[in-house]
Image (spheres, coloured by chain):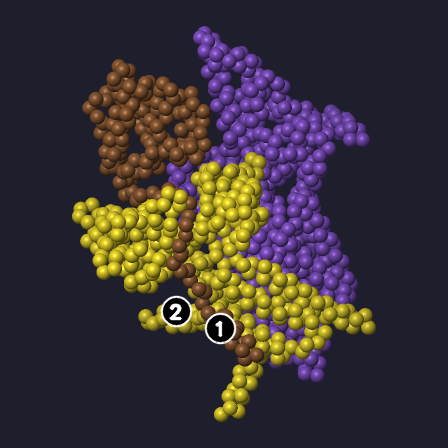
Chain colours: A yellow, B brown, C purple
Amino acid sequence: MHLKLNKLFKESIQFLSSLKLAVFSLLCYFVIVFIGTIAQVDLGIYYTQKLYFQSFFIWTTVFGFNIPVFPGGGLIGSLLLLNLIMATITKLKWKVKNIGLMCVHFGLILLLLGSGLSSCTTTESVMSIKEGETSFFSEDRRHLELAIIDVSQSSHDFIISVPDHILARKKVFKDPVLPFDIKVHSYYPNSQLYRIDDGVNPRISDGIGRQLGVRPLDVFVRDDQRDNTSMILEFFDGEKSLGRWLFALDLNGVQDISVRGKTYKVLLRPLRYYIPYSITLNDFIHDVYPGTTIPKDFASEITLNDYTNQENRDVRIYMNHPLRYKGKTFFQMSFAENDTISIFQVVENPLWQIPYYSCLLISLGLLIHFMLHLIKFSKRVQL
Amino acid sequence: MRVLSFILVILMMSSCKPTKVRTFKAPKEFLPVIQLVTSQSTLNWTFPDSWIEKPTDSFRKASFDIPTKSGSVADFSIVSFPGDVGGILSNVNRWRNQLGLSPISTIELDQMKEKINHSFFDIELFDIRSNTEAIIVAVFTFNSEMYFFKTFLKDFSSVNRIKSELIGVLNALEVE
Amino acid sequence: MKRLIILFIFIFTFFTSSFFATEHYDFESFASIPVLHNGRLKPIDSVARLTLINLQEKVSFKRNNQKISPSQWFFELISLNPITDNDLIIKIIHPDLIKELELPEKDKYFSYNQIHKHFEIIQTKVVPIVDLEPLERSPYQKAVLQLWEKMNLIFNLKHSFFPYSDRSFFDYFNQYKDDLSPGLDAFSRYNSGQDLNAEDTERLVRFNAYFKLHQRLKDLSIVYFYPDLNEYNDITTWTNTGSELLGLLGQIQDPHILLSKFLNLLQFYSDENIALFNSTLTDIEAFHQSQKSFLTTLVSLEYYFNVFNPLGNSITIYLLALLASLFFFLFRVKSLFTLSMGLTYVAFFVHTVGLILRVVITQRPPVTNLYSSAVFIGWFSILMALVQEYLFKNKLGPILASIIGFITLIIAYHLSFQSDTMGLMQAVLDSNFWLSTHVITITLGYSGTFLAGFIGIYYVFFNLVSSTSNELNRQLSKMVFGIICFSLLFSFIGTVLGGIWADQSWGRFWGWDPKENGALLIVLWNAFILHARLAGLIKLRGLMAASIFGNIVTSFSWFGVNMLGVGLHSYGFMEKEFIWLVGFCMSQVVILSLPYLPILKNRYMELSSNLR
């Protein structure tokens, strides 16, 4: 029994480190990247990434059944990684001759591992600031939060943020930090709101939603369209119902919910990342090439103000010159409203340096390896 | 090595930890109340009977004379501008300048700000007084236009009455 | 020295104009004058060529079966010579639009006058189209929009100097100068609140009319003739005629020296005084030369680049070289090989000169857009083909080099009719170390993959027509292997540099953008070939077939991803080229499957094992 297992283990190691697996994975990955690129025309980058490049299988619907038709980028990526590691350990001879190849393999392992991990550790968000105004948070473009805000303190607001994926899944959600329990009656990933002219929406007992109807829509796949997520929530104080409210991204404002004599302002909004410092946009500059409307340069003059360490300085953020501060990087991304609003891409990725190191390793390895070949080759030519 | 590959598989398989419920203490910020207003909707107002209506011009949406005890008249106007008209601070300082007062900072602005309770609007009231004159202005946003309800008093004879009448007008604002 | 030359030219023109009866307008001098246009300083010749390309998608055109130079046509256009209104230079291809505008249905090129009659129809149609997203527009709507843009272009150019033909600019300007100071007086009286008498009122009204017209000229004119006299090198200070005229309103000053020159030039042209016309042009040239600016040097370099057209001419030489090497393969005469080799070297030299000139003129890296990538990919593939010829002496060099040169430069030639090949780049693409290194290394990778693919094609055809030795096949296989290693190296480094650039610009190393994916596909394909060969899964035939498939992969990531119409940094969008791309891919599939056809199978023997 033990022997059999041992044999099986050996065989699987053999398989996992085989060159054939590498060839197979490379070919599969090639196909996935190709299909994924074509699919972007209809699906947009975000969904192709999810469906093709990060998934373990690519699914399709045949006669109403969802069946996997091809391994996804996630699976093949993991296979390639395993294969690489196994091959490096078992196949590659640790000799000076192979130093280039070893560099390449180590670099590739680091690259694949790093990119796999950093897809988990990266947060991308957007901060838009009007000229003269100050911001202390950025917003996620894909995820929402139900913000429950206690404004009773005069010095600050106390905010409880419930991410929408919790509400999308849960029927009833309880959490000790919440002043009330939440029951999700309906959750629409995308919807259209319309006004009810006569009568009220019977599914909603309180708030602005009584005058509104909800029409579910398919989610938008294009990158420039935004879903209007909406939900009907009932709040409970213990067993006692406080009422049913409608929340939607399009409803751009708060609704009051009172529990035990305290009023909370509640709204559904893009998920926020607060920063422990503030950024003030002093000026947004938009240069064009002379005699044209072709943009030459976008730049934002900002003031960074950190209360924790009294760091207070002016920074210019422009193309290819982001601001890196406390783990976050602010990139000049866009602008709006006649150049009065500047929009920054805010990226937090603790592993951002890994690709640099791995690529350095790989390039060096390839260079060394091919140089050795070239030297060998030129010697032969001379002979 | 078995352990190594095991760890790697776990690493790759483990899906990213999703965001949990989080709590923050954040600086106060303006939280708009939901307004179900379409662009056709209009603002309706009612005024005390004692106010005497004046003809309006292209800037003024409404214009009134308010009689005071001393016999002078206070001038009341409703003006709206698209956008934020340079921000509240610069406007307040403009009115202070009109009364011969020196400009103030944001902190002082926050201190002198009075909030009016209204179900739809976040109305801010500024009571600016020099030694002889006063300007009382209410500011709010509607249909992405900034509205100014402004009273200019040449003396203080009826200032409290006029101010409470103005607050009454603001409370009675309706959106149709 | 310069003065001497100018003097000489002056004397020369003087004498030629007096001695030869067939004197002509010196439009060549006009063509070399530097102007600011679309944000870049260039000779008028380039402006004229680009305008013609925008209007009719080609440079040359004929009037009454006589070839007209771009700069002559351009001068006639901006000086409002009515003859240009009948030139057939506006291309419309959409048949419905042609029918709708009641134009002769068989034609493709139409005149300004023919279309102008219906301009109002076009204008009303355009309004809703402008609001649509570019991808949502139908071919018909695109055609309408394009026509509208073409008409606007002509309209803008007619505002370069003075938009009315019933009056000469010269007379108008002198009237304006006379009216200026009384007008200013009346204006200041009006401003200070004084009462105006009838005469003053009339002056003021006229003053206002001047102001409005000049403002309009300033907004419409797209050619900037006038440098700041103190800041010649700062191109942001260059102005157009409208601004110059407006500038005279502010304070009393002399008009810009070039404005006076152009006023004279237009007057001499309408007076048909050729000698004075030409000498005025000489003065304008002399003015620019006297600035001793490196910009004028670049502009004149660009002018000569246009005139001598090294890249266009090298196409012809590559074609000759290709013919010579084909004949060599037919007749096996050694002198033919020498000839083809010589021609290839000449073509490559001209090609190189063109490439270097472009780099010097644009002051940018060799690859900035699709056009220049074609020039560069071709250039580098040829370089590699010549290097391998030097190393292996297998007589493959000329045929590979000339065929690649011919194809890539033909592609470049067609791409050059899409926009300014030296045009500006989007802000995000502008002047960045990572970007330029990324683009160049990735194009090196493209070049390598293409070269390997072409060797593969050579292998297929050569084995098809003659039975070859094991030795040659072995050599080909080695070459392909080596080149694919090289391509893998460069496409990988290029992809990585692209990642670094993206990380610097947007904070993400990899975003699955189509252009990035395209580069990754090449890396994956090359890695696949190397590993499959190592695993023994593919041998000679497989290697060749895979390298030919590499052509498809490369052309997809070079052109295909631009046609997808998505992505952050696709540097061009095309439509009819799609058919060409599909055709190319099909041809590659056919070629690579030839060795696998049962009837041909025995012509493509695998290498005998002892030689492997």
Relative vertical location of residue A348 with respect to residue C274 in this rendering, above or below? below
Which residue bears the numbered disc 2?
A60
Q: Dividing the picture into quarters, in which one does residue B15 lie? A: bottom left
Tell us which disc is closer to us: 2 or 1.
Answer: 1
Q: Residue furthest right?
A: A383
**Which residue: 68% across, 83% down?**
C609
Q: Secondary structure at mark 1?
A: helix
Residue type beneath disc 2: Thr
Q: Dividing the picture into quarters, in which one does residue B55 lie? A: top left
Report the side of A187 relative to C42 (left or right).
left
**Is residue C28 among what the camera can see?**
no
Q: Nearer the viewer, residue C593 or C251?
A: C251
**Is residue C318 among what the camera can see?**
yes
Residue type beneath disc 1: Ile
**Which residue: 42% across, 32% down?**
B108
**Which residue: 35% across, 49% down?**
A149
Relative vertical location of residue A345 with respect to residue B109 in this rendering, above or below? below
Q: Secondary structure at mark 2?
A: strand
Q: What x and y, as percent, mark residue C561?
A: 52, 58
> Marks 2/1: CA distance?
27 Å
**Which residue: 52% across, 46% down?**
A306
Q: Which mark is residue A241?
A: none
Which residue bears the numbered disc 1?
B10
Q: Quadrant of the N terminus of chain B?
A: bottom right
